[in-house]
Amino acid sequence: MTQDSGPAAVFDTRESVVRSYSRSFPATFETAQQEFVTGADGTRYLDFLAGAGALNYGHNPAFAKRALIDYIERDGLTHALDLATTAKQDFLETFQEHVLAPRGLDHRVQFCSPSGTNAVEAALKVARLVTGRTNVVAFGGGFHGVSTGALAAVGSEFYKAGLHATLPKTTHIPFPDSPMGPFDSLDLLDRLVSDSSSGVEKPAAVIVETVQCEGGVYVAPTEFLVGLRTWCDTHGVLMIVDDIQVGCGRTGTFFSFERAGVRPDLITLSKSISGYGLPMALLLVKPEYDVWKPGQHNGTFRGNQLAFVAAAETIRTHWADGAGEAFGAEVRRKGDLVAEYLEQNVTARFRASVRGLGLIWGIDVSAAGISGAKISRRCFERGLIVETCGRDSEVIKILPPLIVSDESLTAGLDVIVEALYDEAQDDRRTTTGAAPATSTTATP
């Protein structure tokens, strides 16, 4: 395979050094289709990054592309602030009919500025307005965005360095699972709030990801989510579920919390909600908590009409009537395929643990002493784009488009196993001088 020579010099000379993904995947990309992207030099890559979860339905899905082209050709509005438009009406009616109503949800839809962090900002702000309290509980390992309010709820010191004094009041507690092992988060929450001398202000809200992605792919147990809902009800605290990365079908149901049967007070959605990778962010608010005054939380680009068009068409295609059950079942089936593959080819061969559900999986190589960044680099050299996550990038994050074929899914997993094998052998030769063993997995 001919490899791209890398991005043009203009990226180094004119783009800010804050860029990150282009450093991990040094190529100039030009086109994409379904689960594949193609470089400017013609090199094709299998995509297990999927726009960090923004491309659940693949690159350039034909149904949404056709709807967008038709809308543009008839001069449909592109920008409309929060004016009423036919595109927004179609999205709201489609979302109500095929997503909210079948799940017994009556939440109102707030359109936020287009990045997920703004949906989180809105959720935290309205929770404080509703309760009159300022503190928020978040979890170690969590990620919710990098604007000031959302950043306060992020666990990683990397993003908050030097900014602590400017961040809103937030109490962080351990997630039910982490690199330090299982933890009784609910018991700690109860102690902090029930003890009037705990020194912690009763929170306005608890914000939680049902699966922590950036934190290392840690899955919250169902019983924890049920218990958290009960705890919030008992103490008059709003439950916010951040479904930005693992919503829209990623775990095998439209919302990731459906497996627990809970109904959050506030739900944030972004990334794949548009269905086409277009910027769009929503806050779903229970009607009794929709206490905003008109314009109290706004944004110039909270009316992305093209995103409304693509989102409505995506919902009709993948989530309408029986299609939603079939699509979710297919994601779960592929998740089972990944789980079985990793159990046989990773857990059994390397000192690595695997975690996940649906089509979000992590291979934790910390115990094996293998560099996650090196694995990602080896995969890219073999034509697979896969990123890392976790405290020290010790977890290989498997995040393919949900429409990925079984053949591509297996091929990508084969590449990861080959990369793990080669890195382990290099480490062995470095430390012992031993000759490499023979791989038992064929390179796809």
Image (cartoon, rainbow, N blue to C red):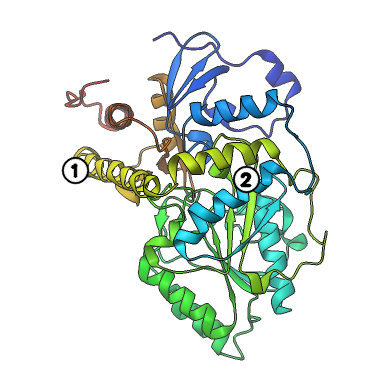
Q: Position of residue 202 (x, y in %)?
A: 63, 81
Among the 4 quarters of the image, the one containing residue 7: top right
Type of residue at label 2? Answer: Asp
Q: Amino acid at mark 1?
A: Ala
Q: Is residue 190 visible?
A: yes
Task: Give the CA separation, mark 1 to mark 2.
Answer: 50 Å
Q: Nearer the viewer, residue 73 or 181?
A: 73
Q: In the image, is residue 124 above or below residue 315?
A: below
Q: Judge from the rendering whether residue 113 lies leftward or rightward of residue 25; answer left or right.
A: right
Q: Quadrant of residue 291?
A: bottom right
Q: In the rendered image, which quarter is residue 182 located in? A: bottom left
Mark seen at residue 90: 2
Which residue occupies the foreground of this view, 406 or 411? 406
Residue found 53% across the figure and 28% down from its top: 24
Label 1: which secondary element: loop
Q: Residues within 10 Å of mark 1 (few under 14, many from 20)?
A: few
Q: Which mark is residue 72?
A: none
Mark 1 or mark 2: which comes first in sequence?
A: 2
Task: Say few, some or many: other residues with alpha carbon within 10 Å of mark 2 (under 14 / 14 to 19 / 20 or more).
Answer: some
Question: What residue lies at 44% left-to-right and 41% top-to-bottom?
Answer: 318
Left or right of 264, for residue 85: right
Residue at mark 1? 348
Residue at image location 53% in from the left, 35% down from the top: 51
Q: Residue 340, how many percent across, how many down?
A: 22, 43
Q: Nearer the viewer, mark 1 or mark 2?
A: 2
- Is residue 27 in view? no
Pinpoint residue 232: horizontal percent, then vertical percent: 53, 78
Compared with 429, 156 (above or below) is below
The answer to whether residue 419 is left or right of residue 340 is right
Residue 284 vs 416, above or below: the answer is: below
